[in-house]
Image (cartoon, helix red, strand yellow):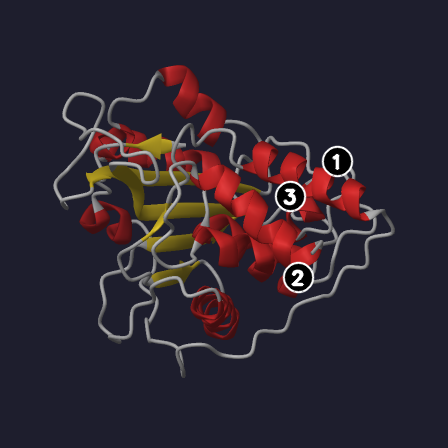
Amino acid sequence: MTSNSGKLGLSVLLSLMLTAAVAGPKNSQPDVTIETVQVTATRDQLREAIVTFVSNVTRRDGENVARWRSPICPSVSGATPEQGEFIRTRILEIAASVRAPVGRNKKCQPNLLVILTEQPAPLWASWRTRSPGMFYEQSQAQIARALETPRPVSAWLNAMMINADGTRGGEFNRLVDSHIKASVSEDISSVILMVDTTATGGATFGQLADYIAMVGLARIDLDADFGDAGSILRVFAKNAQGAPKRLTNWDHAFLKALYQPDRPLLRPRTDIMVTMREELAP
């Protein structure tokens, strides 16, 4: 779910949880362990599956597909120091490997918050009361769907529309699109991921960390049908049997396409599909 305000109220949020140490990645593009998924399908079937996957997971994005442009600075609370560092490091490694911007300053302001708790509902309720700006312009139905639907990992994403000239955008002051490039982009400003530790089932901690990274780097429709796609997103899906043990080449291709530099096309979703097909089904 998205809030166009981009106001997270971090001072309030951080007062409700333990502060985790934040450090940059060891290098800009580390070698990331991913699982290679072998898909037994024809080239045309694989290409169709890619189109379906991208359409489903990004269906809440509209014309734009949101991504980070400011440096990502994750913070993890509710876990042991070792577990928190594992999740934080994994997010940064995956982000750097797909050329997403990462915070290199050890004192960077956390903007991707991961909270592990046995009681997510009271925390969400407290934030809705004490930091209403986080849910600016969203209907109660949208908020309820995002935060009150029971799931192992719930997410709230704030994003802003930015004009091509760098000013704040929107439907009322957007520039005129050219034939090849949109006049506005949607930039993620902050993400909160709440992990219900009583509902993660048989998922390993490694699967959880990679799932968190995937959901934290892109606006994923958690209610989407992931089908038989070779994606870590299937870990908590209804058809979770046989889900990958870690981030897959399929997931990596999606994130690489999302964060390819200076995307020139007017329709980002189509561009992601084309780029994934070129890598997975040339």
- Frontmost residue, 243 versus 87: 243
Mark 1 nearby-residue class (10 Å; few <14, some 14–19, many ≥20): few
Q: Position of residue 137 (x, y in %)?
A: 26, 22
Which amino acid type is marked by label 2? Asn
| Cα distance in 3D space between marks 2 and 3 | 27 Å
Picture quarter with the C terminus: bottom right
- Residue occupied by mark 1: 238
Which amino acid type is marked by label 1? Lys
Mark 2 nearby-residue class (10 Å; few <14, some 14–19, many ≥20): many
| Residue farthest front in this picture | 179
- Residue occupied by mark 2: 249
| Cα distance in 3D space between marks 3 and 1 | 13 Å
> Which label sits in the foreground, 1 or 2?
2
Counting residues from the start of the chain, the first of labels 3 and 1 encountered is 3
**Element type where label 3 sits in the image:** loop
**Element type where label 2 sits in the image:** helix
Mark 3 nearby-residue class (10 Å; few <14, some 14–19, many ≥20): some
- Residue occupied by mark 3: 199
Q: For the point 29% across and 40% down, which residue is it?
A: 185
